[in-house]
Image: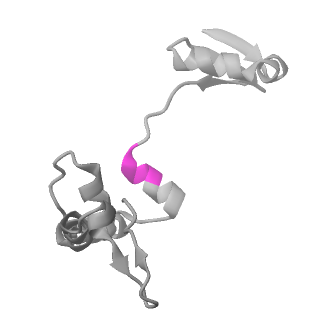
Amino acid sequence: MKTLTITSARQNLGAWLARAGAGEEIGIVCGAQVIALRPVAIHAADYAEQEYRLTMAELAKAAKKIHEEIDAAETFEFTGDIRAAAIPASRADKARSQPRGKAGARENRRGQRRVASAA
């Protein structure tokens, strides 16, 4: 085990942490003790508890609610046509049915002809 003083560990802490993360045994002398640097596995439940202050019961309830919302959401199969995916179905159908160019010209309120813009 490589042992360091607090001062020498502080001077190059990033490098020592990287070496400890890679599996090397690194210890820092603190008074009469040697404190080991080592990676610690973090589990999703631990993260939720620490970050969001959720108990296991609250976490299970939140996960259930999220899954219910996902199941109830309106979904569609993506066929590879990005325009159809970006435009809601009713607008996409309407856009496809309207001719473009001069054939798609309309009159405005003043009776002037205008050409529908391309999407």
Q: Is residue 15 left or right of residue 24?
A: right
Q: Residue at x 60, y 18 (%)?
A: 18
Q: Does the segment drawn in magenta span residue 44?
A: yes
Q: Residue at x 46, y 58 (%)?
A: 49
Above or below residue 10? Residue 65 is: below
Residue 107: percent from left, percent from top: 37, 82
Q: Is residue 62 left or right of residue 42?
A: left
Of 55 and 2, which appears nearest the observer? 55
Residue 51: percent from left, percent from top: 53, 57
Q: Main secondary structure of the magenta part?
A: helix
In which quadrant is the N terminus drawn?
top right
Residue 112: percent from left, percent from top: 44, 82
Above or below residue 49? Residue 5 is: above
Quarter location, residue 103: bottom left
Q: Point out the stretch of residues depicted in magenta.
A: 43-47
Q: Is residue 57 left or right of residue 33?
A: left
Q: Does the segment drawn in magenta span residue 20?
A: no
Q: Residue at x 24, y 57 (%)?
A: 84
Q: Residue at x 41, y 87 (%)?
A: 111
Of 12 and 35, which appears nearest the observer? 12
Numbered-mark total: 0
In which quadrant is the C terminus drawn?
bottom left
Quarter location, residue 13: top right
Q: Is residue 91 left or right of residue 30?
A: left
Q: Is residue 63 visible?
A: no
Q: Is residue 65 visible?
A: yes
